[in-house]
Image (tube, rainbow, N blue to C red):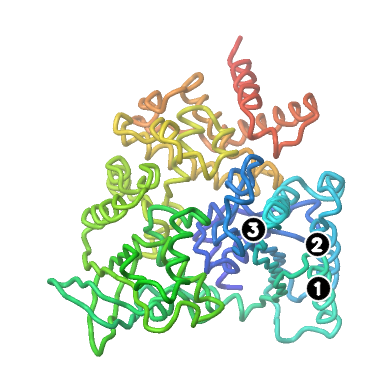
Amino acid sequence: MRIFDSWREEYLPESDAGTAFEIFASELTLRPYGLGLDEITSGVVGGGQDGAVDSVYVFFDDTLLDEDSEVLQPKSRASAFAQERSLELWVVQAKRTPAFSEGALDKLENTLRRVLDLRASLKELEVLYNPSLLTRFGFFRDAWEKLLVRRPRLSVNVVYATPGDARDVTPQVEGKILALRQVVATQVPDARVSVQLLGDAELLARYNERPSYTLEMRYQEAATSGNSHVALVALSDYFNLIVDENGRLRRHLFEYNVRDYEGNVSVNQDIRKSLNNVEGPEFWWLNNGVTILCSEATSAGKKFSLSDIQIVNGLQTSHEIFGALRDDPSAVGAGRMLLVRIIVTGDAEVRDQVIRATNRQTSVKDSSLRATDEVQRNIENYLLTRGWYYDRRKNFYKNEGKESSRIVSIPMLGAAMTAMGLFRPDMARGKPSSLLKADEDYKKVFNTAIDLPIYYWVAKMQRRVDAFIVSEQAGASIQQKSNLKFHLSMLVAERLHGGPVRSPQQLRRIASEELDLPDEELQALFEKLKAWASQYMLNEQAILERAAKTQRFTEYLLERARGERSP
């Protein structure tokens, strides 16, 4: 496939073709969710004992679950989450074979029959499947079991992608698809089950899809000041703005929002009550409304044409409107309206001011306003001077077509700084979601006292390590690829610094001199890391998936590194 070859050259030039195609197919499968490449890569589980499963992703309330997601924590209660929220499982099988295989579907059927059977412990399956696969399916099982009393809206989606022709499959393959669907439906009762074949034509169509940021919105009444507007919009018309032609929420419209959907909190309960109380006061009397930023807004015939839309305030309201109208468009009554502010500006600093101001009017923690911090703007501006792009706003530079290998997100930089600037790769690996939520953790790696060249050096080094560890040269297993990249980054910093680093500012000399390791030294260091990790697993009778998230393993690696330098 020419499109795959082009994509691989741009995004994963050093990766082996098989792994790259798995990531490519997964990215196209999940494109409506707007995931970054790091998030896509985190779900790859193929590569030995994978049961014909290459990638696994779990979404709760449209949010990708990972190790430290709230719903997966033992202390979290089911009552903390709203009823009838969506819990989605996506399973991807991607092979570069020219046709769809009955054997692959047979293996998928057997795997899903086992891993989705809540009567069986996943621990019993460790002899059959690799730890990464079991961990990812464990996310779905744990969330499902916890939320059973909340009646979640379950869906299981299986995608089988090859460069073949999905329109010309044998009756035997069609029979295998039917059997697979039936097995999943049996194991996950009441779930919406889909099995999709993505061939050459389907992959090409998805590759060419681009989210639209220019949309139309009908309104009832409007007032204008300069280029900006305040409008009363029927709830049904606002619903039509935020959903696509398939009835899915346009998640990309909320990429600038300072917080995620917060579920069954009291504020959202009140919003839903106001929506459902069709005999009560007008909805817009009781709701702060939403704020839309755009580059241009023109009006004709009670309809706005809006360019470069971002909904920066009102995410909770938007989700509740979506949930209320998704199944029954008449649920909120006819003629009820929402207050919408439309602010036209192309100034990035003004956008940040609007985001902070509109979100300060409701209860928002400082940790949710990270992207508008001075230090974040400073990092973005500095990286731009070095030809790199800092995605304070998710997918901003990706949508502008900038070179992907030079795009860095806030979570990625935070994790890399934690690994190299604090020597806590275990935290970077084990707390991908909550790492920057606590102010104490955040301020250790993001503050104006840290030299800006350090952020640039750390970003560049992490990207180099990321590219190396998935390359054929590294010879890494799927477990090593997903669990050791931050530990390798730490060891690189340790080697260049000549000892442990406990504060990012200790990287000043390395960053100012732009020190690096030659390819052969990076290779040799990774070989040592793999050997040390294997010895640790043997000594502790542990598996890498769990050990990589512990400080004990980190200290073990540092001790071995110190021993290497000792005479």
Residue under the image location 41 percent in, 64 percent down: 317
Q: Is residue 183 left or right of residue 391?
A: right
Q: Residue farthest to the top? A: 567
| Kind of residue at disc 1 | Ser
Q: Residues within 10 Å of mark 2 (few under 14, many from 20)?
A: many
Q: Is residue 310 left or right of residue 437?
A: left
Q: Residues within 10 Å of mark 1 (few under 14, many from 20)?
A: some
> Of label 3 and label 1, which has the lower sequence position?
3
Q: Which residue is mark 2?
A: 112
| Kind of residue at disc 3 | Tyr
> Of label 3 and label 2, which has the lower sequence position?
3
Q: Secondary structure at mark 1?
A: loop
Q: Which residue is mark 3?
A: 57
Q: Secondary structure at mark 3?
A: strand
The nearer-to-camera label among 2 and 1 is 2
Q: Which residue is at the front of the view, 531 or 444?
A: 444
| Kind of residue at disc 2 | Leu
State the mark number for residue 101.
Answer: 1
Q: Which residue is at the front of the view, 503 or 1?
A: 503
C-alpha span from label 2 to label 1: 17 Å
